[in-house]
Image: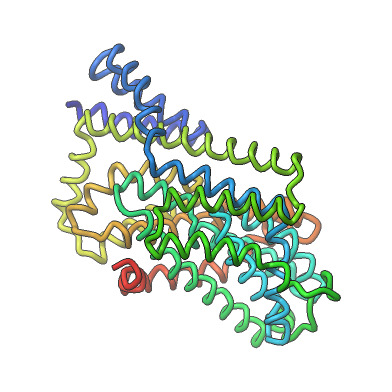
């Protein structure tokens, strides 16, 4: 073992990331080079050759492409386009009703998506023009959609939660259950915030609205049944114990395809695009995962993971101190890294520490995903903000959107504090 080599590897990784080297490339380079220095070239090549299969062959990970396919098919077939309008019909007469409809639309889309970026982009294209037309301040409207998109990774099926479950060797279904409570808490907090702003600052959020101008003559409730059907079938069976998370992904993808074809909304061109986007996203996630597994092995072989864990354990941190350290760590990483990279780089070091502290790994997985999603809207590299900037560039600048998400970040901090003080908010559902 060579703790010095491991620590130098961590420093090299941070340097490569600072130089904007892709996360997967940085992880694989550092891991391969470190193992080569410690054990020689042949063992390093052997680990590089076997790790991709060892990682990708995980049965649980097959849920990732299936849930992605379900989301992309539902999106390209137009099955999700009326979620926002249906929510608007329910809430239009309430203060900030249109803003709350946007948040609920994001929540509904999250149930068939699993990606905050896709959620923000899809709902942003539909909701932001309507909110601007209704008199919402552009910065607040765009900020609300950037923040609402983060619900996409909290409400199952969450790709982040699947990856976490595999690495932490814990139940994906239980993490999903915990994600439901936090996703609903987030949606409620955002809605309450919108109502408060409408009451206190009608110059930012109009007090009332007569309804969306989108297809006002039709009934959107008649067109959201496919999404409701998929949610009932997939998650009713999953949480009812009828099938596993992996089987739920396959059933979800199949149901999305069958419904879309039956409705005549899935011509070959759209299906091909959904397949290509599924493959591209899956490959990019799996490459990062392969790099993370190699990095975990490198830290284990060098003894660095154990050294860091024992050192932090020797500090005898209290529960509050440990949680503050973790929250600060991920909030900082979220400012500069995308969620998958931030999660997979840190888990090899944190998991031994969490196990030593007897932290519930299901609860921590939900907290971690929430932390990572806050990073999606924090400056300077909040990815959801850049997505909203692309779909609403004519309404608000990047600085405007970052100002718009500030209140929503404050709401997220409150939710994080509640989750840490009252873990039963998650564990009550997971058992």
Is residue 374 visible in the rendered structure shown here?
Answer: no
**Residue 7 falls in image quadrant:** top left
Q: Residue at x 39, y 57 (%)?
A: 368
Q: Which of 423 and 33 is in front in this view?
A: 423
Residue 264, image x, y percentages: 77, 52
Residue 20, image x, y percentages: 53, 34
Rendered-image quadrant of the C terminus: bottom left
Left/right placement of residue 102 relative to residue 335 reads right
Left/right placement of residue 287 relative to residue 2 reads right
Is residue 210 visible in the rendered structure shown here?
Answer: yes
Q: Residue at x 73, y 72 (%)?
A: 222
Q: Is residue 338 above or below residue 91?
A: above
Q: Which of 393 and 249 is in front in this view?
A: 249
Q: Residue at x 74, y 86 (%)?
A: 208
Rendered-image quadrant of the N terminus: top left
Q: Residue at x 38, y 30 (%)?
A: 12
């Amino acid at each position: 073992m060579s703790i010095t080599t491991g620590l130098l590897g961590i420093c090299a990784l941070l340097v490569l990331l600072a130089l904007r080297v892709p996360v997967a490339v940085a992880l694989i380079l550092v891991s391969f080079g470190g193992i080569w220095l410690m054990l020689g070239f042949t063992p390093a090549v052997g680990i590089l050759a076997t790790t991709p299969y060892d990682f990708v062959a995980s049965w649980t990970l097959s849920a990732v492409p299936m849930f992605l396919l379900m989301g992309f098919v539902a999106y390209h077939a137009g099955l999700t386009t009326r979620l926002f309008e249906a929510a608007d019909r329910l809430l239009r007469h309430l203060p900030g009703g249109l803003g709350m409809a946007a948040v609920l639309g994001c929540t509904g889309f999250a149930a068939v998506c699993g990606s905050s970026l896709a959620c923000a982009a899809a709902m942003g294209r539909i909701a932001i023009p309507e909110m601007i037309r209704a008199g919402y301040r552009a910065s607040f409207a765009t900020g609300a959609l950037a923040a609402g998109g983060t619900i996409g990774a909290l409400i199952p099926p969450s790709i982040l939660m699947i990856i976490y479950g595999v690495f932490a060797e814990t139940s994906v279904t239980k993490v999903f259950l915990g994600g439901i409570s936090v996703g609903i808490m987030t949606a409620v907090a955002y809605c309450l915030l919108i109502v408060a702003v409408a009451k206190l600052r009608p110059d930012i959020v109009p007090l009332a609205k007569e309804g969306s101008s989108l297809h006002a003559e039709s009934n959107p409730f008649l067109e959201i049944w496919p999404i409701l059907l998929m949610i009932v079938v997939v998650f009713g069976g999953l949480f009812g114990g009828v099938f596993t998370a992996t089987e739920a992904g396959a059933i979800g993808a199949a149901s999305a395809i069958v419904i879309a074809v039956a409705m005549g909304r899935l011509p070959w061109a759209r299906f091909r695009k959904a397949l290509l986007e599924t493959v591209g996203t899956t490959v990019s996630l799996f490459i990062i995962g392969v790099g993370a597994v190699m990095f975990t092995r490198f830290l284990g072989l060098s003894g660095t993971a154990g050294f860091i864990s024992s050192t932090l354990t020797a500090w005898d941190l209290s529960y509050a101190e440990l949680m503050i350290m973790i929250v600060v760590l991920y909030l900082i990483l979220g400012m500069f890294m995308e969620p998958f990279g931030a999660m997979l780089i840190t888990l090899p070091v944190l998991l031994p520490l969490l196990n030593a502290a007897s932290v519930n790994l299901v609860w921590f997985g939900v907290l971690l995903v929430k932390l990572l999603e806050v990073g999606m809207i924090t400056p300077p590299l909040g990815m959801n903000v850049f997505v909203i900037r692309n779909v609403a560039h004519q309404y608000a600048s990047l600085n405007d959107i970052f100002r718009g998400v500030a209140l929503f970040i404050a709401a997220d901090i409150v939710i994080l504090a509640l989750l840490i003080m009252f873990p039963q908010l998650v564990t009550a559902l997971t058992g």
